[in-house]
Amino acid sequence: MDAKYKVNRLQTTNEIRPLVDKHWADLRTAKERGELVAWASGPSFIFAYAMGMKCHFMAGYAAYCGGIGAGEEVLKVAEMAGDLPETCSYHRLHMGMGEAVARGIPINPQAILPMPDLMVAGRLCPEMSHYAEGLHRRFGVRVLPIDLPAVVDMEDMPRIREFVYRQFKEVVIPTFEEVCGKPFDYDRMSEILSVLKKVATLRNQCWEFFKDKPSRWTLWDYGVSIAPVFYLMGNPAGVAYYEKLLKELQERREKGIPAIAPDGEKYRLYWDGWLPWAFLGKFMRKFIPHGAVVLCGRYPWEFFPHPELIDPEHPVETWADLYYGMESHLVYTFSPKGTVDLIGKLIDDYSLDGLIMFSSKTCRVMNLAQPEVIDVLDKKYGIPGVIVEGDMIDSAMISDAQIETRLQALYEMIDSRRR
Amino acid sequence: MEKVLSKIAEVTSDPYGYVAGLKERKNKKIIGCFPMHVPEEIVHAAGLIPVVIWRGNEPVTWGHAHVPPYDCGITRSFVDDAVRGKLSFMDGFVFHIRQCLQAGEFPFIMERHFKPAYQKILYLPAIYPGDATRDFALKELESFKTSLEDFTGNMISDDSLKKSIEIYNKNRSLMERVYEIRRAKPEILKAKEVMQIVWSGMLMPKEDHNELLAELISGMEEKSITPQKERIKVILVGCLCQTLQFDILDLIEDLGMIVPDDDLYIGSRYFANPVNLNGNPMKALADRYLTKSPLCPTKGVWDIHWGDEAIKRMRDNDAKGIISVRVKYCPPHTCYYPDFRSKMAEEGVTEVMIEMEHEIISLEGVKTRLQSFAETIGGV
Ligand code: SF4
Ligand code: SF4
């Protein structure tokens, strides 16, 4: 191992934390200001924002808890309340938080959220329904469920798009109107989408810097910058953030500054699966000393690769099309076929040397086909891959020794193929 | 009765051999339907033989390279069977990929390792409010029907579908009768035999199964039972998608308990709710899928409680406790379970949960749990 490598930290990414903190602080205090609160999973929060509600987002909350180091204690409360450790850790976090509030168990106050006036359960994954059901059964939360099927074959897309669009029009919008006591605010949804279009366009320009050799930044930087395109959607601060980030990356390019000092990376890697929010630093420390950098991934890239398709004039239609349109079809990247297509392109465009497939022990949304995906891509592109087991939040599911061994194997496979 | 039971045991002791032989004997194609919600009637009406995929009887071997250890037993066993070529007698597969995350990636694995002549993905919806849900469920079933028509080259008429539904409904009512007699005379069948009876119906053509059931029922009706000693009645709940190890069922009985009824998938859930034969058969099949009870935790239902249903079943049968059988790494059941258990506690019902893995690690742990459960409810 060569100890010479170290990270060149970006300045702009330091600005994300205050934005994110403000979002969650606003949510925590919303009820005090008499505001309505929603919780959301799947891509459903935009409807709450359009109605001026403060809204939580399931995965965003998990990332936040992981980021503030509150994950473990909240998971412990869930376990105490009977949730089983093999349950999705995002699910357990929410149960734990709800139980902590209901039973008066002290946890990090930043991790406590007000119970929602409405929970929008976008069932992209069945677990998103299970957790909403659990919250309803335990705490009487009102649930607005929407089925958002992950599509595994493009030919299935049109009829599923129709189903999803009808649910938006016939169930989601009327329910929000009832809960908020006012007509649905299509204009506000359009505004949110206009901001999103700008942010996503800038973000995609930033993404292009992964093509540089050496890369100017890492997937971890990209991952922590996700909030403005996601649960901070419609917040103009996102535009300013990405403009600044783009400028910093451009400067790096001009000055020849790589993501890792002194001369850039030795291994350019793909990362599959959710980001390990509570362990970003841990993984970074396993990459950098080897000169490895993760550049592209399936998860953070999946949002809005085609901002040009966002049509703020037709907000509800465009929202359905972003996920289920034949051109944009975000949900397809969850499927193994979609993944193979996506990673194949990434390997070519970003000069990748290897693949890390992060297999979450409590989330089975992608992990069953990961060995197959490695095999297909190895055969087609001669790129090796390894599976790294773990979890996004729960340290009990993380084995340092196993991660080290698998990563070492990957580095060695790449070296041997280079010889 | 004994003859029927031994025929049934023969089928379930070697499902691979039985189904492969069936294909030869009937000269028909076999379509494997991944449990739990594929409407087999449509496959039947297409002139094919639907069989419900099962958890195999061998430990996972090659499958280790294809499926993580933290997936449920039937997932691991099915992938293992598929990559080892043990299912080569099957002509096609149907996967309802929205019931849980495990099922979602089967089609890709199958295409790579099996290349079935026919493969269909169903996206049956959660039972959520709004007309869109029912319309979409119907569209899914229509697309299933069309795909089978394309595969066989034959149209499926409403009449032929109704005939198939009649055969399936007949099977449901016969199974219901078996359960009715068992409720009245629980000693008449061992729990293992009941599971074999249901499971054999998932493997055999329903016409053949119906004949066996008719014979079995007349035997059961005639047979008088004198309970040798007072046994403690318990209800089994859960075990989605897969057969419970017979050793565990025997253990329950060896510990002095008896099972008069169950809420298992390979049990009463499989044959619950006949399809309404009046009107459009496709709509009727969609309606059956969209029925909320018996509650299936894969269907997104929260206005009724699984715990209430289980408690009612327990009380109706004058049983003293509930044994939850949870398949390890089955998220739908695992996520529901804490609330199920709370409901038991609220209602003062004694309940125990046993975890079911594909490879039994040790029966000792299960035995200890069941023993103390039996003691609590007044058994041994
Ligand atoms: S199982 Fe995975 S995809 Fe589903 S909610 Fe949990 S983390 Fe998200
Ligand atoms: S047993 Fe549970 S996890 Fe496994 S396939 Fe069935 S529903 Fe899914």
Image: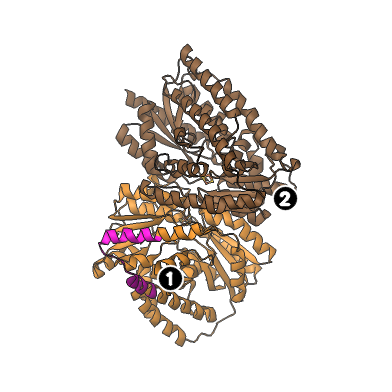
Chain colours: A brown, B orange
Relative to A259, say whether B134 is above or below. below
- Where residue A1 appears, as percent x and y from the top left, is 46, 21
Name the residue that disc number 1 marks: B198
Residues A287 and B147: in front is B147
Category of crowding for the residue at label 2, using alpha-carbon neighbours closer than 10 angstroms: few (below 14), some (14–19), many (at least 20) = few
| Total numbered badges shown on the rendered structure | 2
Chain of the residue under label 1: B
Q: Are discs 2 and 1 located on one and the same chain? A: no
Q: Secondary structure at mark 2?
A: helix
* Residue B62 visible: no
Residue B101 covered by magenta stretch: no
**Which quarter of the figure is the C terminus of chain A placed in?**
top left
Q: Which mark is residue B54?
A: none
Relative to A382, say whether B8 is above or below. below
Name the residue that disc number 2 marks: A102
Instruction: Return the residue found at the far top.
Output: A255
Residue B144 covered by magenta stretch: yes
- Where residue A167 appears, as percent x and y from the top left, is 52, 52
- The amino acid sitting under disc 2 is Ala
Relative to A7, say whether B323 is above or below. below
* Residue A221 visible: yes
Chain of the residue under label 2: A
Residues B168 and B230: in front is B168
- The amino acid sitting under disc 1 is Val
Residues A409 and A19: in front is A19
- Where residue A381 appears, as percent x and y from the top left, is 31, 32
Q: Which residues are magenta?
A: B141-166
Horizontally, is B308 left or right of B167 in the view? Answer: right
* Labels 2 and 1 touching (C-beta < 8 A): no
Is the stretch drawn in magenta largely helix, strand or loop? helix
